[in-house]
């Protein structure tokens, strides 16, 4: 494994896996180019070092070639940020001549990798009534062709850089398998290095007190995250919809609030484990409830364990926020993933925004703060606090799996000798 800062790119072609999975409107215009901007330092490093760039990414979840998922729609923006013209290969498996002709300082973007089933290694087009044997044969066939797909991509370049943390948890051709073709010339980009450092700061090198704030709608989506964190943190704040499963597990009345009865045993197990380890689990003590899942519903504030029938928890109440703010400001390491209310509705965004505010204040006091997950990131961005926390992660699913304690294939492939 090489380091991007010390690698000599002069006269070499670098194939770089980025995450340019950006949102486009109906006119194929980019509505948020955060992911493109995040990769620019890595891409410029290659060009400034005298190398040529071959950029590869996915966009959306196509089931084959589709106009709305073509990476040609982002070329102008990439060119704008790099300050050089950008060439395009409309078929990433037939870019031999274009790649070979690249000169130092030139850039080639390959078409959407997921136009090919081989990128993900999953068969497509199977009949709904396909037998198990047919499914098995189709899977074996696409896995075999995946090898040729990966080898072709690797043949275009002299070195490989993975700078796509958002897909680091996928063992795809471009994120993990390709690395073996560059045993002595593979490395992380700056974005990946930053993400890995941030996760290590909270999971391996955390200063205590260490607090994790885990929100979102369902316990089932973050069960393994909670089980892993309860062994590492001093405080575990559980908010959002998932909190009501824990409140019900404690015997609370939660009205019509979102919850998962089948996970009550898991919630009890986590709380028992926390008690054994001396970990403070902090649930909402006061809730803003509504009589409908709507921004315009009737609203009142009640104790979180006394939500009446016909009403549902929608946001953390002021007392809950006060409790959590105190925990946050007394912490030296803070991890935040997931909103503590129905953040997309302005009426119920207060709790999540107050968490963002508290994290910014804690950071100013010297705490290390890591924010990840779509709504959490949206909250710090909306309040203008993205540069007032220590690190904002670009990868939701990848970050969650890392917090679960899993080895991410895209990271392991670079680290392997």
Image: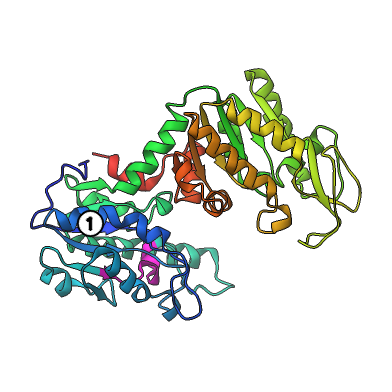
Q: Secondary structure at mark 1?
A: helix
Vertical placement of residue 232 versus 217, above or below: above
Left or right of 205 in this view: 89:
left
Name the quadrant of the C terminus. Answer: top left
Would you identify the image quadrant in which residue 172 lies?
bottom left
Name the quadrant of the N terminus. Answer: top left
Q: Nearer the viewer, residue 305 or 329?
A: 329
Q: Nearer the viewer, residue 334 or 179?
A: 334
> Could you tell me residue 31's position as x and y percent?
47, 69
Left or right of 343 in this view: 57:
left
Residue visible at 65% across and 33% down? Answer: 325
Residue visible at 28% across and 49% down? Answer: 189
Vertical placement of residue 298 versus 305, above or below: below
Vertical placement of residue 18 versus 97, above or below: above
Q: Is residue 111 visible?
A: no
> Could you tell me residue 217's position as x and y percent?
68, 50
**Disc 1 marks which residue?**
44
Residue visible at 70% across and 37% down? Answer: 321
First to last magenta residue range: 109-119
> Could you tell me residue 207's position as x and y percent?
47, 23
Mark 1: few, some, or many residues within 10 Å (few <14, many ≥20)?
some
Q: Is residue 314 visible?
A: yes
Q: Nearer the viewer, residue 413 or 225?
A: 225
């Amino acid at each position: 494994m090489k380091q991007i800062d010390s690698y000599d790119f002069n006269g070499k072609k670098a194939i770089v896996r980025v995450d340019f999975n950006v949102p486009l409107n109906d006119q194929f215009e980019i509505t948020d180019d955060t992911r493109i901007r995040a990769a620019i330092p890595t891409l410029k490093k290659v060009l400034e070092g005298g190398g040529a760039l071959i950029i590869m990414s996915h966009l959306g979840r196509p089931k084959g070639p589709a106009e709305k998922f073509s990476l040609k729609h982002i070329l102008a923006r990439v060119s704008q940020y790099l300050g050089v013209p950008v060439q395009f290969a409309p078929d990433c498996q037939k870019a031999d001549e274009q790649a070979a002709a690249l000169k130092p300082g030139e850039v080639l973007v390959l078409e959407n990798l997921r136009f090919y089933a081989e990128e993900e290694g999953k068969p497509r087009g199977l009949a709904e009534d396909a037998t198990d044997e047919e499914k098995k044969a189709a899977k074996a066939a696409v896995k075999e062709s995946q090898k040729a797909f990966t080898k072709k991509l690797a043949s275009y370049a002299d070195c490989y850089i993975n700078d796509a943390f958002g897909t680091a948890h996928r063992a795809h051709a471009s994120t993990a398998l390709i690395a073996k073709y560059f045993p002595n010339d593979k490395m992380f980009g700056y974005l990946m290095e930053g993400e890995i450092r941030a996760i290590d700061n909270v999971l391996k090198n955390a200063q205590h007190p260490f607090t994790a704030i885990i929100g979102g709608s369902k316990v089932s989506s973050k069960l393994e995250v909670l089980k892993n964190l309860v062994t590492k943190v001093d405080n575990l704040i559980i908010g959002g919809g998932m909190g009501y499963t824990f409140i019900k597990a404690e015997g609370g009345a939660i009205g019509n609030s979102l919850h998962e009865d089948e996970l009550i045993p898991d919630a009890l197990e986590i709380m028992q484990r926390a008690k054994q380890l001396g970990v403070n689990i902090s649930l909402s003590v006061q809730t803003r409830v509504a009589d409908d899942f709507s921004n315009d519903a009737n609203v009142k504030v009640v104790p979180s364990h006394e939500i009446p029938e016909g009403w549902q928890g929608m946001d953390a109440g002021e007392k809950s926020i006060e409790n959590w703010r105190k925990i946050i400001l007394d912490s030296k390491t803070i991890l935040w993933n997931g909103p503590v209310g129905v953040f997309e509705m302005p009426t119920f965004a207060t709790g999540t925004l107050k968490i963002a505010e508290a994290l910014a204040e804690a950071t100013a006091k010297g705490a290390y703060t890591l924010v990840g997950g779509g709504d959490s990131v949206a909250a710090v961005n909306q309040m203008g606090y993205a540069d007032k926390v220590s690190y904002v992660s670009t990868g939701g699913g990848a970050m969650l799996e890392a917090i679960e304690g899993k080895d991410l294939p895209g990271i392991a492939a670079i680290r392997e000798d």
